[in-house]
Image (tube, rainbow, N blue to C red):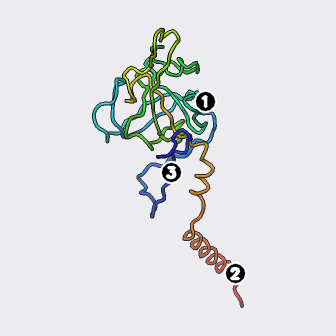
Amino acid sequence: MGDLASGADIALLGLNAMAPVEVSRYGLYTGFDEVGQTFTRVGYGIGGTGAGTSGCSGTKRLGMNEYDTAGTALFGGISSNVLMYDFDNGNPANDAWGILGIPDAVGLGGFETMAAPGDSGGPNFISGLIAAVTSFGFSYTYSGGPFCPIGTCSPDTVAGTNSSFGEIGGDTRVSSYAASINAIVFAPTPSTLLLMLAAARFLLRRRAPRSV
């Protein structure tokens, strides 16, 4: 497996033919101001209510969260190509970033979501544009502070990485790759070049003056 912390968990797939017209098209978010913004996640992963995953994957679900930081030096270092967020329930004891001293929002109430198994690779939108690709999630333990007077503690409401309140998620930042993606998507292929050249020759023949 690759290093998800590097922020390179992204791929571009080519199709042999044009996608059907009924398939929705979306642009890319190219600004680097994602931190502090609310995003909408769409995925087909396992469901849940904040107390861990439940049910089956395959149902389209969506919800919201807010990007709190781009990468971090914590946890061995995570690239700024990763947009990160935590799963808040409004309780400071489960505020994963707040406990670590990183300012973040108190949560979006019932709209707040966390990625789950099966959501990986799904899009996350800001202003209707794809801003990130779902990548990973994790929980952590810590010691000290007002919420951990003795031993080690975790902001996670249910032990283990299971998409419960108190966990942290990371998504691959699309703005870091937008230029490369656009260079491939909008670059003419050999077949389209032939069509373009053929069209140019046709136009030249039509525009050539007639001899008397």
Which residue carries the number 2 mark?
Answer: 208
Amino acid type shown at disc 2? Ala
Q: Label 3 is placed on what type of residue? A: Ala
Residue sitting nearer the eye, 157 or 133? 157
| Eye-nearest disc, 2 or 1 | 1
Residue designated by label 3: 11
Using the image as rendered, state which of residue 87 and residue 142 is in the foreground: 142
Pair 1/3: label in front: 1
**In this view of the protein, which residue sits in the foreground, 95 or 139?**
139
> Whole-percent x and y of residue 78?
57, 35
Which residue is pictured at 36% across the width and 22% down the height?
A: 158
Amino acid beneath label 1? Ala
What separation in Å lies between label 2 and label 3 (alpha carbons)?
Answer: 46 Å
Cα–Cα gap, marks 2 and 1: 65 Å
Tell me where residue 83 appears, x and y as whole percent. 55, 34
Residue placed furthest toward the left:
55
Tell me where residue 211 appears, x and y as whole percent. Answer: 71, 89
The residue pinned by badge 1 equals: 73
**Mark 1: which secondary structure?**
loop
Identify the mark nearer the N-term, 1 or 3. Answer: 3
For marks 2 and 3, the one nearer the N-term is: 3
Of pointers 2 and 1, the one earlier in the residue sequence: 1
